[in-house]
Amino acid sequence: MKTTPFCFAARFIAMLCCGLCFSLAQAVELSGRVVAVADGDTLTLLAADKLQYRVTLAGIDAPELPQDFGQKSKASLAALALDRQAAAHCRAGEQYLRATCVVSVGGKDLGLTQVQAGMAWWYRQHAAEQTAQARADYEQAEFNAKIRRLGLWNSKNPMPPWDWRRRRLNE
Protein backbone atom coordinates (compact mmCIF):
# COMPACT_ATOMS: atom_id res chain seq x y z
CA MET A 1 0.00 0.00 0.00
CA LYS A 2 1.46 3.34 -1.04
CA THR A 3 1.14 6.46 1.05
CA THR A 4 0.74 9.72 -0.84
CA PRO A 5 2.16 12.94 0.61
CA PHE A 6 -1.39 13.90 1.61
CA CYS A 7 -1.91 10.56 3.38
CA PHE A 8 1.42 10.93 5.18
CA ALA A 9 0.46 14.43 6.35
CA ALA A 10 -2.98 13.21 7.46
CA ARG A 11 -1.45 10.27 9.33
CA PHE A 12 1.09 12.56 10.98
CA ILE A 13 -1.67 14.95 12.10
CA ALA A 14 -3.63 11.98 13.43
CA MET A 15 -0.56 10.89 15.40
CA LEU A 16 -0.36 14.36 16.91
CA CYS A 17 -4.04 14.33 17.81
CA CYS A 18 -3.83 10.88 19.36
CA GLY A 19 -1.04 11.95 21.68
CA LEU A 20 1.67 9.81 20.10
CA CYS A 21 3.72 12.95 19.75
CA PHE A 22 3.56 15.46 22.59
CA SER A 23 5.19 18.55 21.19
CA LEU A 24 6.98 19.85 18.14
CA ALA A 25 10.26 19.45 20.00
CA GLN A 26 9.76 15.71 20.39
CA ALA A 27 10.50 13.12 17.76
CA VAL A 28 8.67 10.29 16.04
CA GLU A 29 10.30 6.87 15.82
CA LEU A 30 9.74 4.69 12.77
CA SER A 31 11.18 1.33 11.89
CA GLY A 32 10.73 -0.92 8.93
CA ARG A 33 12.20 -2.02 5.64
CA VAL A 34 13.61 0.38 3.06
CA VAL A 35 11.59 -0.34 -0.08
CA ALA A 36 12.75 2.47 -2.38
CA VAL A 37 15.51 5.02 -2.81
CA ALA A 38 14.54 8.18 -4.70
CA ASP A 39 17.94 9.90 -4.65
CA GLY A 40 21.02 10.24 -2.45
CA ASP A 41 19.13 11.63 0.54
CA THR A 42 15.55 10.34 0.18
CA LEU A 43 14.14 6.87 0.76
CA THR A 44 10.84 5.13 1.40
CA LEU A 45 10.36 3.11 4.57
CA LEU A 46 7.67 0.41 4.82
CA ALA A 47 6.77 0.49 8.51
CA ALA A 48 5.16 -2.19 10.65
CA ASP A 49 1.77 -0.48 10.16
CA LYS A 50 2.11 -1.38 6.44
CA LEU A 51 2.26 2.30 5.45
CA GLN A 52 5.07 3.73 3.38
CA TYR A 53 6.85 6.84 4.65
CA ARG A 54 8.94 9.04 2.38
CA VAL A 55 11.94 10.05 4.45
CA THR A 56 14.60 12.70 3.85
CA LEU A 57 17.89 12.04 5.61
CA ALA A 58 18.54 14.74 8.20
CA GLY A 59 21.78 16.69 8.14
CA ILE A 60 22.68 16.19 4.48
CA ASP A 61 21.86 17.40 1.00
CA ALA A 62 22.79 15.08 -1.86
CA PRO A 63 23.24 16.06 -5.51
CA GLU A 64 20.02 16.15 -7.51
CA LEU A 65 19.68 13.23 -9.94
CA PRO A 66 20.55 15.27 -13.09
CA GLN A 67 23.57 16.80 -11.32
CA ASP A 68 27.07 15.35 -11.42
CA PHE A 69 27.19 12.49 -8.89
CA GLY A 70 23.38 12.50 -8.53
CA GLN A 71 23.02 8.96 -9.84
CA LYS A 72 26.12 7.77 -7.97
CA SER A 73 24.79 9.24 -4.73
CA LYS A 74 21.47 7.44 -5.24
CA ALA A 75 23.28 4.17 -5.99
CA SER A 76 25.38 4.61 -2.86
CA LEU A 77 22.31 5.07 -0.64
CA ALA A 78 20.59 2.12 -2.32
CA ALA A 79 23.62 -0.10 -1.63
CA LEU A 80 23.54 0.95 2.03
CA ALA A 81 19.82 0.67 2.66
CA LEU A 82 17.60 -0.92 0.01
CA ASP A 83 15.72 -4.00 1.27
CA ARG A 84 17.27 -3.62 4.72
CA GLN A 85 15.67 -3.00 8.10
CA ALA A 86 16.06 0.60 9.21
CA ALA A 87 15.30 2.75 12.23
CA ALA A 88 14.32 6.38 11.75
CA HIS A 89 14.38 9.07 14.42
CA CYS A 90 12.26 11.84 12.88
CA ARG A 91 11.63 15.46 13.72
CA ALA A 92 8.03 16.12 14.64
CA GLY A 93 7.81 19.28 12.52
CA GLU A 94 7.17 18.32 8.90
CA GLN A 95 8.64 20.09 5.89
CA TYR A 96 7.62 19.40 2.28
CA LEU A 97 5.12 16.75 3.48
CA ARG A 98 7.80 14.20 4.26
CA ALA A 99 9.64 13.18 7.36
CA THR A 100 13.15 14.48 8.02
CA CYS A 101 14.92 11.75 9.96
CA VAL A 102 18.22 10.37 11.13
CA VAL A 103 18.02 6.90 9.60
CA SER A 104 20.25 4.04 10.60
CA VAL A 105 20.78 0.56 9.18
CA GLY A 106 22.71 -1.87 11.34
CA GLY A 107 23.49 0.97 13.73
CA LYS A 108 25.13 3.13 10.99
CA ASP A 109 23.78 6.63 10.38
CA LEU A 110 23.03 6.67 6.64
CA GLY A 111 23.38 10.45 6.29
CA LEU A 112 26.77 10.46 7.96
CA THR A 113 27.85 7.51 5.83
CA GLN A 114 26.84 9.37 2.64
CA VAL A 115 28.90 12.40 3.73
CA GLN A 116 31.88 10.20 4.64
CA ALA A 117 31.81 8.64 1.16
CA GLY A 118 31.64 12.04 -0.56
CA MET A 119 28.12 11.34 -1.83
CA ALA A 120 26.46 14.28 -0.06
CA TRP A 121 27.15 17.62 1.57
CA TRP A 122 26.74 18.23 5.27
CA TYR A 123 23.72 20.57 5.25
CA ARG A 124 25.08 23.39 7.40
CA GLN A 125 21.88 25.40 6.94
CA HIS A 126 20.17 22.84 9.19
CA ALA A 127 23.04 22.29 11.63
CA ALA A 128 21.07 23.87 14.48
CA GLU A 129 18.71 20.87 14.32
CA GLN A 130 21.57 18.48 15.06
CA THR A 131 23.17 17.67 18.38
CA ALA A 132 26.59 19.17 19.02
CA GLN A 133 28.15 15.71 18.55
CA ALA A 134 26.32 15.13 15.25
CA ARG A 135 27.45 18.55 13.97
CA ALA A 136 31.04 17.73 14.84
CA ASP A 137 30.80 14.26 13.25
CA TYR A 138 29.24 15.54 10.01
CA GLU A 139 31.66 18.46 9.74
CA GLN A 140 34.64 16.15 10.26
CA ALA A 141 33.24 13.62 7.77
CA GLU A 142 32.85 16.28 5.09
CA PHE A 143 36.33 17.65 5.76
CA ASN A 144 37.86 14.16 5.50
CA ALA A 145 35.99 13.40 2.27
CA LYS A 146 37.18 16.70 0.78
CA ILE A 147 40.85 16.22 1.60
CA ARG A 148 40.73 12.60 0.40
CA ARG A 149 38.87 13.75 -2.76
CA LEU A 150 36.16 11.13 -2.32
CA GLY A 151 33.06 11.01 -4.50
CA LEU A 152 31.83 14.43 -5.55
CA TRP A 153 34.92 16.03 -4.02
CA ASN A 154 36.95 14.48 -6.84
CA SER A 155 35.19 16.89 -9.23
CA LYS A 156 36.94 20.08 -10.24
CA ASN A 157 34.24 22.38 -8.85
CA PRO A 158 31.35 20.49 -7.22
CA MET A 159 28.14 22.53 -7.06
CA PRO A 160 26.06 22.17 -3.90
CA PRO A 161 22.50 21.05 -4.67
CA TRP A 162 20.97 24.17 -3.07
CA ASP A 163 22.95 26.32 -5.57
CA TRP A 164 22.04 23.97 -8.43
CA ARG A 165 18.32 24.19 -7.56
CA ARG A 166 18.47 27.99 -7.30
CA ARG A 167 20.25 28.23 -10.66
CA ARG A 168 17.62 25.97 -12.29
CA LEU A 169 14.79 28.13 -10.92
CA ASN A 170 16.39 31.26 -12.38
CA GLU A 171 16.75 29.74 -15.88
Image (cartoon, helix red, strand yellow):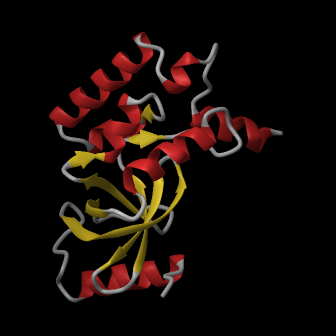
x, y percentage for residue 24?
24, 65
**87 lies left or right of 162:** left
Which residue is outermost to the right? Answer: 171
Q: Is residue 110 above or below residue 120?
A: below
- Residue drawn at (21%, 68%), measured in percent from left and top? 29
Name which quarter of the figure residue 49 lies in. Answer: bottom left
x, y percentage for residue 57?
39, 51
Name which quarter of the figure residue 121 lies in. Answer: top left
| Image quadrant where one finds the C terminus | top right
Report the front residue among 141 and 148. Answer: 148
- Residue drawn at (53%, 80%), measured in percent from left and top? 4
x, y percentage for residue 68?
66, 32
Report the front residue among 1 and 75. Answer: 75
Which residue is outermost to the top? Answer: 147
x, y percentage for residue 161?
59, 37
Q: Is residue 125 above or below residue 65?
A: above
Report the front residue among 18 and 31. Answer: 31
- How many numbered callouts? 0
Q: Is residue 135 above or below residue 142?
A: below
Q: Is residue 116 above or below residue 4?
A: above
- Residue drawn at (45%, 28%), measured in percent from left and top? 118
Name which quarter of the figure residue 23 lies in. Answer: bottom left
